[in-house]
Image (cartoon, helix red, strand yellow):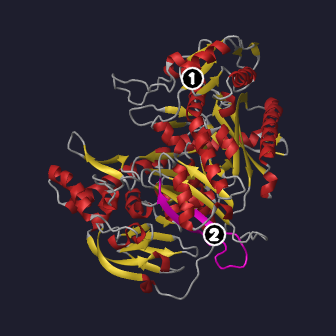
Amino acid sequence: MVRYAGYKDKFRAASDVGGTFTDLVYYRVDTGTEACGTVQSVKTDTTPPDFETGVMASLEKAGIAPADLEFFAHGSTLVINALTEKKGVKTALITTRGFRDVLEIARGNRPDLFNFNFRKPRPFVERYLRAELDERVNYKGEVQKAVCLEPLPELLDFLKAEGVQAIAVCFLHSYINPENEIQVVARIKALWPEVSVLASHQISREWREYERTSTTVLAAFVHPVAKNYIESLERQLHAGGFTGKPFMMQSNGGITTTDAAKANPISMVESGPASGIFAAAGLGRNIGEKNLIVLDIGGTTAKCALVENGESRISTEYYINRDRKNPGYPVQTPVSELVEIGNGGGSIAWIDEGNRLRVGPQSAGALPGPAAYGKGGTRVTTTDANLVLGRIDPDSFVGGAVRPDWEAVNAAFKPLQDRLGLAREELARGIVRVANANMTNALRLVSTNKGYDPRDFTLVAFGGGGALHALALAEELQVRRVIVPVNSAVFSAWGMLLTDLRRDYLLTCPLELEPGNADRLASVFNTLIGQARRDYSDDNPGSHGHEIGFEYYADMRYRGQEHTVKILFPFADGRADLALAAEWFHAAHEKRYTYRLDTDLQVVNLHLVAKVEVDKPDLLEKPRTGMRPEDAVKRVRKVDFDRTGIHDAAIYDGLRLEPDMKFNGPAVVQEPSVSMVIPPDYTVTVDRFGNYHAERR
């Protein structure tokens, strides 16, 4: 634990805004108190559309004034919600003459191949708002035609009259030479200072015209919304006396300054899930479990990812609104490789036209929430089903702060019961089974579908619903061990306290992997390093007390291939080891696609990760008092374990469980915001940090 002289009553805190709850995690960093370093948490309702209201309410509930904060990190679903719900601003696109229809042409690789009524997703920018300018940069980055700025004044007058609030600028091959884009952006800002304008080279330096244009447009679409939100949060924090600058969680698993987040809002598209994944990877390294399947079940969605050898994968091949019938919209920004589905505690159960029971993706959200909350919810959710089955204790519902509204629960169940002819408990079992099946399919997408055997991994489950469903999912996948971490209900927010400042720099520079290109590869990496140092200099990383650390990656392929594989690239002391890079690529390609080729290799993208460490809380060991497991039993009550039947289950107070305790199912571990359901034939042990490890006996 890092101690700070002169910081009496100061806190480090992080908040995560989810679809249902806003989580706050914090710890004291002053000296001389037993509470120093002890992580605590609170939950409040998420407050759309003014999400900052919920954040400030969480601080108030924790009894922390903004003036008491030494450090504050924040993650939000604002960007992804604005994109999926199309609640951004009216956006225009300025592009190279002849390329205004790139967004509409898109790609031909549709997922629903035999659907003859298929329609491509509607572009975020209508055609009449897509303008062209004369300019041309070739594939080598040579300016063949300087951009003609003469049409800009008249064009901007037209866009003003149409109510445009944001402009995306994306020219051909500007990923390698942005000179023409820079001129256009400067001219727009001079003629129309109030408009939001983003250029593609500020967002992505990778090739593929459609993907880069789509990403720039999506970033511009949410730019004013994200900027206003971040600035509103900053104002409220500063009004309360906060003298620092908050940090924003990014999709790449790192935090960044608010200025950087406002400049590139699309980098926050999956900020909350990313912090949970990286927290799980960090936890695994601490307890000697480096191969993990990570599952985060919140109130609205379930997210899952794979951690191999202590590291999670980062990809720039991300899509929003993509499913088995819709190709979605590509987002070319570094994102933790994950699968997200609409199944959480608030997911609504319904019956489709074929009279089949379905769960999600619709959610009851924070308001009205599940029927049991008594806030006006009229439809059955997964939480209501778990409550009916006794998996959630009515006496400890929402940490004991809410008494379940059984009248509302029964009223919500009745229409589905009447239609299916089932008793309430039978219907509740069906809802849980369908929800589990949906989540099992998502877990297979990140494991078996990519050539990994789940039996070689440990499942780490967190979020408000993670512990409820984890062991049933592990049974389906034959996973050997399940870990429910300490602070599991607020694990993503806790992960933000463990996250370093991070910036990713990717640049497309197609080169053969041969000795003659070694100097060119080194030159590109050194250019990216220089850019990173300049950017961090603006952020004043010295204030965090650590130097910039660099990691080197490359996206490589066999000559003639379309796809690439990302590898750690052997670059040190200004030199690239090409022979070792080839060896690592062959091994990575074979692992992912089961074969290797004896052919020439190409480097497509170079990827630099620049990190600055920030101070983090130690993973404190839980104290021992000599209690026995039975001393933590609150009561015994009946719990429905579905396929293994209804059993008298011991109900353990999770706050009283201590390291090295071991007990058997059937049981339920209850914490204020989490219930861990332990079927018969499972044994749970508590490690020295307070994490629960469950294994089949």
Of the image marks 1 and 2, the number of the one nearer the N terminus: 1
Q: Does 290 sit above or below residue 169?
A: below
User: Would residue 352 appear left or right of 209 to someone viewing this image?
Assistant: left
Please give the residue where the numbered disc 1 appears in the rendered image.
Answer: 92
SS for dot 1: strand
Residue 607 appears left or right of 533: left
Whether 45 is among the magenta residues is yes
Considering the image in quadrants, where does the N terminus appear?
bottom right
Residue depicted at 74% across the width and 56% down the height: 613
Q: Mark 2 points at which residue?
A: 619
Q: Position of residue 252 (x, y in %)?
A: 62, 46
Mark 1 belongs to which amino acid?
Answer: Ala
Q: Position of residue 586 (x, y in %)?
A: 64, 40
Rendered image quadrant of residue 408: bottom left
Q: Nearer the viewer, residue 509 or 166?
A: 166
Give the residue drawn at x 72%, y 21%: 187
Which kind of residue does numbered mark 2 sit on?
Answer: Leu
- Using the image as rendered, state which of residue 555 and residue 319 is in the foreground: 319
Q: Which residue range is magenta in the image? A: 25-46
Give the alpha-carbon distance from disc 1 to disc 2, as whole Å: 48 Å
Is residue 120 positioned above or below 289 on the image?
above
